[in-house]
Image (cartoon, rainbow, N blue to C red):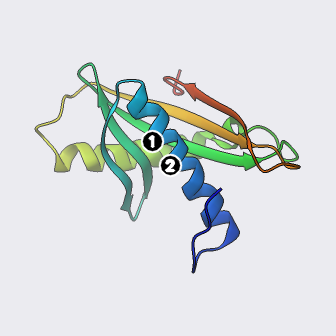
């Protein structure tokens, strides 16, 4: 993990997870439109485009599984907040396709070595 001055360890962990997720998505044919789009209703970690669909990606990063897997942290309330932010983003960008999808990228680091243990892309988490 790369250090970031002026950030909390949690923010550094989250930023490293988002960097890995963005790299993974790019390598798999997704075009990143923006990262960390913030509204007063919530934040969109990564907004990308693939095959005529706008994909909103929630990135969850954890060290180990003491508190469960990263994807288990995505609650129904969190999904509603993401979808609200996605609607705001879509409204601000009418040129984008209407087709949308909400995905998750789970990033886990090994607690003993600090190395990447797992990166998993889960498509369409609203189903």
Q: Nearer the viewer, residue 124 or 77?
A: 124
Q: Residue furthest left?
A: 95
Q: Quadrant of residue 42?
A: bottom left
Q: Quadrant of residue 52?
A: top left
Q: Are marks 1 and 2 in contact (CB under 8 Å)?
A: yes
Q: CA distance from mark 1 to mark 2?
A: 5 Å
Left or right: residue 86 versus residue 67 is left
Q: Residue furthest bottom?
A: 6
Which element is circle 1 on?
helix
Residue 15: horizontal and vertical position, in percent?
55, 57
Q: Nearer the viewer, residue 44 or 120?
A: 120
Q: Residues within 10 Å of mark 1 (few under 14, many from 20)?
A: many
Residue at the spot x=61%, y=61% of the render? Answer: 2
Residue 10: horizontal and vertical position, in percent?
67, 64
Residue 41 higher or lower than 80, as above or below: below
Q: In which quadrant of the rendered image does the N terminus lie?
A: bottom right
Residue 119: horizontal and vertical position, in percent?
64, 33
User: Can you identify the residue that label 1 sits on?
Assistant: 22
Q: Nearer the viewer, residue 49 or 114?
A: 114
User: Can you identify the residue that label 2 sits on?
Assistant: 19
Residue at the spot x=12%, y=40% of the render? Answer: 94
């Amino acid at each position: 993990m790369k250090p970031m001055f002026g950030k909390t360890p949690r923010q550094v962990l989250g930023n490293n997870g988002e960097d890995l997720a963005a790299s993974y998505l790019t390598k798999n044919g997704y075009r990143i439109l923006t990262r960390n789009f913030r509204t007063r209703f919530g934040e969109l970690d990564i907004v990308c485009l693939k095959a005529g669909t706008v994909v909103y990606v929630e990135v969850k990063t954890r060290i180990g599984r003491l508190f469960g897997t990263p994807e288990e942290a995505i609650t129904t309330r969190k999904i509603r907040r993401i979808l609200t932010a996605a609607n705001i983003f879509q409204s601000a960008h009418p040129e984008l396709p209407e087709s949308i999808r909400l995905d998750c990228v789970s990033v886990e680091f090994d607690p003993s070595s600090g190395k990447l243990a797992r990166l998993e892309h889960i498509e369409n988490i609203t189903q």
